[in-house]
Image: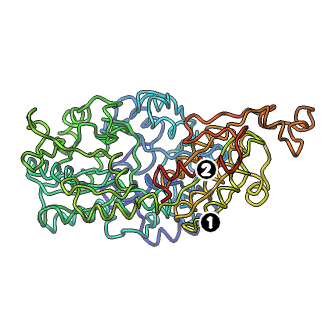
Amino acid sequence: MKVEPNHAESLLVHFRRAEELRARATTYPSLDLNRRQLCDLELLLNRAYYPLTGYLGREDYQSVLETMRLADGTLWPLPVCLDLPGEVARTLGPGDNLALRDGEGFLLAVLTVQEVWRADRAAEARALLGTDDPARHPGVRPLVEEVYPWYVSGAVEGISLPVHYDFRPLRLTPAQAHRRFAEAGWRRVIAYHAERPLFRAELEATQAAARQAGAHIFLHPAVVARDPGDLYHYTRVRCYQRALAHYPKGLALLGILPLLPRGAGPREALWQALIRKNFGCTHFMVAEDQGDPLAGRDSPQRIYPLNAAYELLAQHAEEAGITPVHLEPMAYVEDKAQYLPLSRVEPWMQVKSLSFPELRRRLEHDLALPEWFAPPDIVEELRRAWPPRSRQGFTIFLTGLPGAGKSTLAKVLVTKFMEMRGRPVTLLDGDIVRKNLSSELGFSPEHRHLNVVRIGFVASEITKNGGIAVCAPIAPYERSRRQVREMISAVGGYIEVYVSTPLAVCEERDRKGMYAKARAGLIKGYTGVDDPYEPPARPELEIDTSDITPEEAAQEVLLYLAEQGYLR
């Protein structure tokens, strides 16, 4: 798609054109956009992605991958494409229209198709991330496995920006932000792309960068909720709101940006800076690991070389029209009772630090946090998101072969938890779920995976709301269990218990005669016979029920929970 200059404040059409498009769109094929696609569409429509006026065509796409430029030479480091499932792509051709809708079917824009093509996502991963191996880069799996295989290009006509009900005053468009800067008389503005709450080290570092640039601060975190009940999303934004009070009055303005990270390292940092240029910023803070998906994990491991992002931005600063400024890490020096840039810390100085895992541990165990680390009001917000484990919801996820003793152990645990009367308790046994939640599913690998993911979703809702979910499916595949772990760990405690009773013992206990039928070929795809069971890679507990009673097995689980702080 040829990208033509368009200096309008947005790609939203006049209301009369919008009425016309709404009437016509009833006959157009539709695409309900996912979270990632909604973010891209919003940033296209509000001109955060200026100069783009739609989704990239194949020529622009290939040029961006190879040169970080559009086909006309314009600097643009990451492709902005709309991916489609094959059944939709096969219905479209040049000149056709596609209605773009949110998850509830609300019409947001109309795309006029220029071309449709099948993308090589592995090649895209190699160009953007340096590898197509998920083990080497966490951004590979979402790109290769979660993006549809077909791309469609063309200009978009916007009817409405995606609707947000949360933090509306903070959702500034580029035009609104630019006006706010002008009204305040800010001529030099430095943007900070935050991805975690701001503690004292970040507050000190951002003020130091602002002093270096002689600029005001536009605190502009990338914030996208996973779902409407994403508590951490709200906590992050409230922490940023609290952080404003810890800057000198009039120094900083807060806005939030619906941008999902790609993990593309220096390319991504340049992309972040170009977006902030479109918001009216003159400078951009660049951390030494900006854009690295392993940044901020309290580990020396990195995918990209330190300061590679700054070097790339400095190389293109004049063309990009925005100046990079080093965001130098700060350290708390106990001798001086103040933060200093790491470059000024002498070997003899006593430096204190608190890692993010240690922060989580202290919150979960209701331990004190030093004031030098974070202001009390920000700590208060964090404690609301991460209450002590004794007040958190959690899931016990039992997995193992048929006949291993999962269901019996689950029933004993439910009884014990009910006796404690501390939290509401729900049993999600495999047979119960199959009857009430997944009755239409068969026993193919994909249906078994879907059944386990459904259990995980229900358990995550129970956990998020402070309850206890006891799950006892077979869950034979590691990928299913991994997805469930990720889903539940984001909202509370997750304890995977591998009931590792040997196959021979399970067959001896076969009260329903299922193993015998499978051995005789009367049923197919039975786990442990002609369908594999993949043992968990790293369960929290492993229990063999061959020689212990259900009560003894339950006691092992209860002791672990008490040791980890979930029970008092």
Q: Does 180 sit left or right of 68 as displayed? A: left
Rendered view: 127 above or below 18: above
Rendered view: 484 above or below 479: below
Q: Which of 389 and 560 is in front in this view?
A: 560
Tell me the SS state at disc 1: helix
Residue under label 1: 419
Rendered view: 505 above or below 187: above
Q: Where is residue 112 in the image (x, y as percent from the top left)?
A: 52, 52
Q: Where is residue 14 in the image (x, y as percent from the top left)?
A: 42, 69
Residue under label 2: 555
Rounded to the nearest angstrom, the CA distance separating label 2 from label 1 is: 14 Å
Q: Hey, what amino acid is under mark 2?
A: Gln
* The image quarter in which residue 115 lies: top right
Q: Position of residue 436 (x, y in %)?
A: 76, 61
Q: Nearer the viewer, residue 448 or 68?
A: 448
Q: Is residue 324 visible?
A: no
The residue at the point 11 percent across, 44 percent down is: 340
Q: Hey, what amino acid is under mark 1?
A: Glu
